[in-house]
Amino acid sequence: MRGIQNTISKIKMPCPKTIFVELTNICNFNCVFCPSHLMTRERGFMDFGLFRKVVSDAKDCGIERFNLWIMGEPFLHPNFIDFVRFAKENNIKLSLITNGSLLADVADEFFSLTFSEEDELLISCLTSDMYAFGLRKTKKIDYQSYEKGIYGFIERKLEVGSKIKLKIIYLINIISDIVDIPGLIINTEGVLKTLDTWRLFAEELQRRYNVYYDYQFPNKSEIKKSIRKKMSLTFEFIPGVYFDLKWLTNWGKVILPNGLKVIPAEYGYCAYPFEIIGVFWNGDVTFCCDDYNAELVIGNIKQRSLLEIYNGEEIRRIQSEINKGILSKKRCQICQGIIVNKDGRILRKYYKKYFLERIYRHFKIHGFRKTIRKIIGEIKGQYLRI
């Protein structure tokens, strides 16, 4: 048996096809629904030499797509355009993200780069009006300038004919009765109000350029169905520009209102150690894209290659434990833990509302076997631990 285990341990595990790369963990916003204010690790910028190594190692591993974010605002990096250009010169498929505040400043230089239809830029508008924009907690830009910059950026894309997809991201809080963040979209009416703004913008572009976009906005019943069934709501409304409604998350049970706490779980299952790899700005490597404070580091790319790290003893041990339903990392225990009120009572409304939805989404992404492990971990965590 030991011989078989030794043989298995020598087999090189292929890296995931997508890697998260944090260019910086510095941000010019301080959103209330983001754990940036809880982050205690050093803040800084990735240097270009380290990025070149990440690209080289990633290509050796067969990684095809770069998500250029973990924490921070990537467009703040003084060499952001150079990073993107280098990635495209190496035929890397890119997923970029931004809070949108700097788009007006970089539009011309950004669209001078050559993108493909497989590249995308996620513009995290997140909040739907001037009042809700206060949740972003920034003094760097007012709402009118922010909105104008995003509109101008989209218009510039159409003018130059860039192939990169733009996705306009908004948040909906469907657990507002449990986690109340005033200002976020919480229902169908809120979605419709936000869509009306973008419908008017699309119609204005059609009049200005004398073109016709044959795209249909979802109606009220379609939006209700999407919210009720927890389905994503994504649709194209301008050529190469998409509306994308995302569910509010708590970053692995980190962002919680006062009066709620988490009882860590000893048992559970997570697919991230098998499917995620990320590199922080300083070269540390993680297996979780929600690892905002770098608590799940398994190596540093300055010292070893990505392939060596992903096949190292630390990640192999974690994967083995996860396969047995064991959560040894404190961060994982909290993420898989149980939310309780100040009296220690389980929020059954929360689990009734979310258990089946999360299991269904897990099944769609990870398949039957991993979902069964997830269910067992959930049951152990909720009923055996407490």
Image: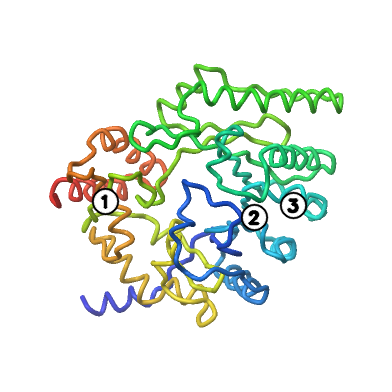
Of badges 2 and 1, nearer the viewer stands 1
SS at badge 1: strand
Give percent across and percent down for residue 251: 41, 51
Q: CA distance from mark 3 to mark 1?
A: 43 Å
Q: Which mark is residue 331?
A: none
Q: CA distance from mark 2 to mark 1?
A: 36 Å
- Which residue is painted at 66% across and 77% down in the image? 49
The one nearer the camera, 342 or 242, is 342
List the residue tagged with mark 3.
Answer: 115
Inter-mark Cα distance, 2 to 3: 9 Å
Q: Secondary structure at mark 2?
A: strand
Mark 3 and mark 1 in contact? Answer it, CB < 8 Å: no
Q: Which dot marks residue 262?
A: 1
Q: Residue at x 65, y 74 (%)?
A: 47
Q: Answer left or right for 207 relative to 133.
A: right
Estimate the x, y position of residue 124 in percent, counting from the top left: 59, 44
Q: Label 2 belongs to which residue?
A: 94
Q: Is residue 286 above or below residue 239?
A: below
Image coords of residue 56 (percent x, y): 63, 73
Model colouring: rainbow
User: On the rendered image, what quadrant is the N terminus found in?
Assistant: bottom left
The reply to whether dot 2 and dot 3 touch (C-beta < 8 Å) is yes
Query: Of label 2 and label 3, which has the lower sequence position?
Result: 2
